[in-house]
Image (cartoon, rainbow, N blue to C red):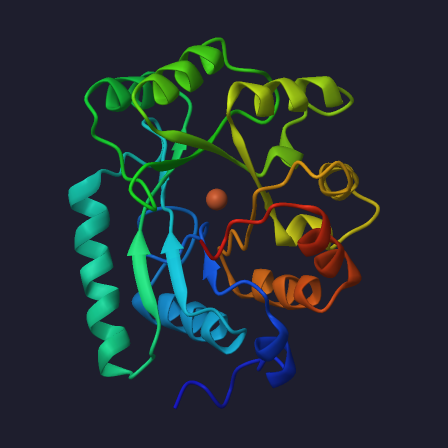
Amino acid sequence: MFFSSLFKPQPYVAKQNPFKVDIHSHLLPGIDDGAQSLDESLRLIKQLYLLGYNKLITTPHIISDYYPNNREIITEKLHIVEKALKLEEIDISLEAGAEYYVDMHFLNSIEDDNLLTFKTHYVLFETDYMSKPIMLNEVICRLLQKGYIPVLAHPERYIYLHNNIEAYKELKALGVLFQINAKSLYDNSKKDCKIAKKLISLGLVDFIGSDVHRMRDIKRLEAFLKSRTCQKMIKSNNIRNNF
Ligand SMILES: [Fe+2]
C-alpha cells in the first residue's frame, strides 16, 4: 500500500548486501531525533528490509538532558512497532538497544548494571562531538570491568579525535570496538568520510551501522552497499555485524 509511492532499492543490492544485521538506527517513533511517527517507523523499516537486512537492533538516544529515555519507554515503543510490523506482514526481526551519551546518567547506569545492550553485553555509546569527555576513560574502564564490550558509535565524527590517529589506536587498545556509519562514506569532501576511510584502511572497523534517522539515510546506505569501499571493508576488516 504505502510501498508503491516509495523509493525502492534495486533488488540486486539486497542480494549482495553482506550485512544481514544492523546495530545502529533510530526507528522507534517519537522518542528521539529519528522516526517521529509509527508510519515513518514502518516506512524506514520496510526500506531496510528491501535492502536485505533481516535483523535490526534499533538504538534510541539516551541523553539525560535531551532524550531521557529508559528501558520502559523504549520497550513500550518497541512493542508498538513490532505489532504494526506483524499486521503489515513485514518479516524482519526488530530488537532495541540504545545509543548512550557519555554523561553521569550513563556512568550511573553502568554502576547499576541497568544497560540496554545487544548480543547480551555489547554497549553502543557516543560522546560530545567537539571535546573529549573528562569521564571517557572511566566509563570505558567501568564497562570493561563489568564484562561489557564498549562499541563507539561513528568514531569518524568526533572532531577531538580527528588529526590524531594514535588516539583511535589507543581506544582500540583499551578494548573499544568501532562502528562507523555507512552514511559517512557518502561525501568524499567531508572530514568524516576521510576519517572513516582511514579507519577502514587501517583495519580498525568492527561494525558498519546505518544510523538511519530518516529516508535520506536509506539512499546513502544503498549507495554504500553498492560501493567498492564496502567490498574493501569486508576484505580488510573483521566486521562483526552478522555474528
Ligand atoms: Fe545514532
Question: Which residue sits furthest right?
Answer: 189
* Of 92 and 81, the residue lying toward us: 92
Q: Tell me residue 17's x, y (percent).
A: 60, 70
* Residue for point 26% across, 38% down: 69
The N terminus lies in which quarter of the figure? bottom left
Q: Position of residue 32 (x, y in %)?
A: 37, 46
Say how many tags the image has.
0
Residue at 24% in and 17% down: 111
**In the rendered view, would you say 90 is above or below 59?**
below
Q: Is residue 64 visible?
A: yes
Q: Quadrant of residue 105?
A: top left
Q: x, y (%) of residue 151?
A: 47, 34
Q: Is residue 29 visible?
A: no
Q: Quadrant of residue 149?
A: top left
Which residue is found at the position 73% from the left and 60% from the top?
Answer: 231
Q: Is residue 20 left or right of residue 189?
A: left
Q: Where residue 3 sits: x, y (%)?
A: 45, 86
Residue 87 shown left or right of residue 201 in the figure: left
| 137 left or right, relative to 37 | right
Q: Nearer the viewer, residue 216 or 55?
A: 55
Measured along the vertical axis of the image, is residue 87 above or below residue 81?
below
